[in-house]
Amino acid sequence: MSSKDCGHHEDESRKLIRLILFGVGGFFFVVLLTIFIIWAVLRPTKPKFTIQDATLYAFNLSSPATNTLTITMQVTLSSHNPNRRIGIYYSNLHAYASYHNQQVTLATELPPTYQGHKDFTVWSPFLFGAAAPVSPFTLSSLQQDRGAGAVVVNVKIYGRVKWKVGTWVSGRYHLFVNCPAYIRFTGAGDRSGSGIQIVAPAKFQLLQGCSVDV
């Protein structure tokens, strides 16, 4: 075989390789473009969370000598998927209570779940905080709230979500939820001196919407 024939075969091989690469690249481009168009048309809407009620079993603020807060509560949280064609996977969910951006309970894990189109999901976690140290600012704020007769405890949720369109599932996105729970000191026990103690159990119907970031 002459050197001219060898060069001709090499040129054909290069052309074939280029065609294969262009074909594979074109295929992936079409797939990605299709996913993008579906995503743009459907435009997934973030879930809507509501805190329905809170049952307080303990809410005890110690004197300024120790500055600790003990809180035990159970909350009912609901999530609604407003999308008509998109499902939502929830994973690595945890809930905890905070006051003035200070975490006052341990994080409670929520079970992972899949939420279909227009579906609802309800969780009822217990939140525990035993003698959690609080800052002097938090102590002062709680004492002011005691005088006002109510306190706002924020129930926060963090975790991951994935969107499901047909058989396609997206990557994971961070989920942050903030639910204000308005707790009244009506029927409180010890409100004299520096401590705060609510007679428990006390159930509060809230039906309060939550802020959601994805």
Image (cartoon, helix red, strand yellow):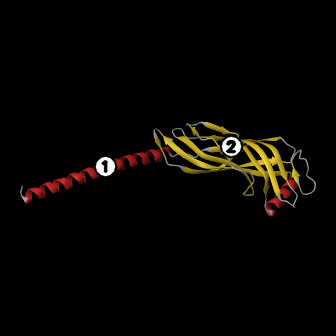
Q: What residue is rendered at 83% in x and 49% in y?
A: 59
**Front-lying residue, 83 or 18:** 18
Where residue 154 appears, x then y in whole percent? 73, 51
User: Mark 2 falls on what kind of element?
Assistant: strand
**Front-lying residue, 59 or 152:** 59
Residue 34 seen in the current view: yes
Where residue 20 appears, x then y in whole percent? 26, 50
User: For mark 2, what is the residue?
Assistant: 50
- Position above or below: 144 against 83: below
Three-letter amino acid code at the position of disc 1? Val
Report the side of 104 relative to 66 (left or right).
Answer: left
How far apart, in angstroms, are the residues tagged by discs 1 and 2? 47 Å
Report the side of 176 relative to 126 (left or right).
Answer: left
Report the side of 197 relative to 18 (left or right).
Answer: right
Three-letter amino acid code at the position of disc 2? Thr
Q: Earlier in the sequence, mark 1 or mark 2?
A: 1
